[in-house]
Image: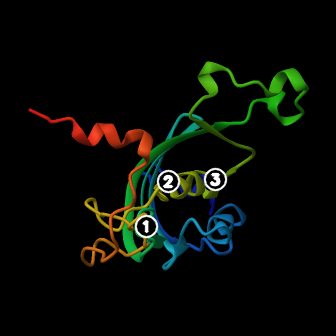
């Protein structure tokens, strides 16, 4: 969302809007890869405050995801949400027409987002936070037992009926050891 600096008064600016992940190129890749399906638009609440030339942003995001369990392969839905903050600063002159040496990040640049002119774009900050919400390895529940390695039965619905896997003859001697 494009926010003009003039809209941010001394008391700040509060925005609530829906961010459509399907229309965003970075988030559409998440769906195409099968990592997650966005079942709802991302609800974005932002509080913007100007402090000199900088704009401090505090926000809250929430979205419902369709996921596949990494252990039992069951599909499930999960509501995810996060609070975040970021700082926008005017883009320095050397970043407007950079040379290869200017593209290196300095320590003071980490965590900053730049704006050019009299408006800033919040989409990049929102996109980064939504990507961080998508679980690396989703689990349908914390105690998911997964699938039987022999027959593939879902162990969450009950014990499988397959026989025990044959023991590797090289490891058979270990079965004779007794634990105390």
Outermost residue to the left: 180
Q: Which label sits in the foreground, 2 or 3?
A: 2
How far, Cα to Cα, is label 2 from label 3?
20 Å
Left or right, residue 4 beside residue 165: right
Q: Is residue 127 above or below residue 23?
A: above
Q: Is residue 52 above or below residue 121?
A: above
How far, Cα to Cα, is label 2 from label 1?
26 Å
**Secondary structure of the residue carrying numbered label 2:** loop
Residue 123 image point, x, y percent? 62, 58
Q: Is residue 113 above or below residue 28?
A: above
Question: Callout 2 environment at 10 Å: few (<14), some (14 to 19), or many (20+)?
Answer: few
Residue 150 numbered tag: 1
Residue holding disc 2: 136
Residue holding disc 3: 124
Whichever of labels 3 and 1 marks the residue nearer the N terminus, that label is 3
Q: Is residue 4 above or below residue 38?
A: above
């Amino acid at each position: 969302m494009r926010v003009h600096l003039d809209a941010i008064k001394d008391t700040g600016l509060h925005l609530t809007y829906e961010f459509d992940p399907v229309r965003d190129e970075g988030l559409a890749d998440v769906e195409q890869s099968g990592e997650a399906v966005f079942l709802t638009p991302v609800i974005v609440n932002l509080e913007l405050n100007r402090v000199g030339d900088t704009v401090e942003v505090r926000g809250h995001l929430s979205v419902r995801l369709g996921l596949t369990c990494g252990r039992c392969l069951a599909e499930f839905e999960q509501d995810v949400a996060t609070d975040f903050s970021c700082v926008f600063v005017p883009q320095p002159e050397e970043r407007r027409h950079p040379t290869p040496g200017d593209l290196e990040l300095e320590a003071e640049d980490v965590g900053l987002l730049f704006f050019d002119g009299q408006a800033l774009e919040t989409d990049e900050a929102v996109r980064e936070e939504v990507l961080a919400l998508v679980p690396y390895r989703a689990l349908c529940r914390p105690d998911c037992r997964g699938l039987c390695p022999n027959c593939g039965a879902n162990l969450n619905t009950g014990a499988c009926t397959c026989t025990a896997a044959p023991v590797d003859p090289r490891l058979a001697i270990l079965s004779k050891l007794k634990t105390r």
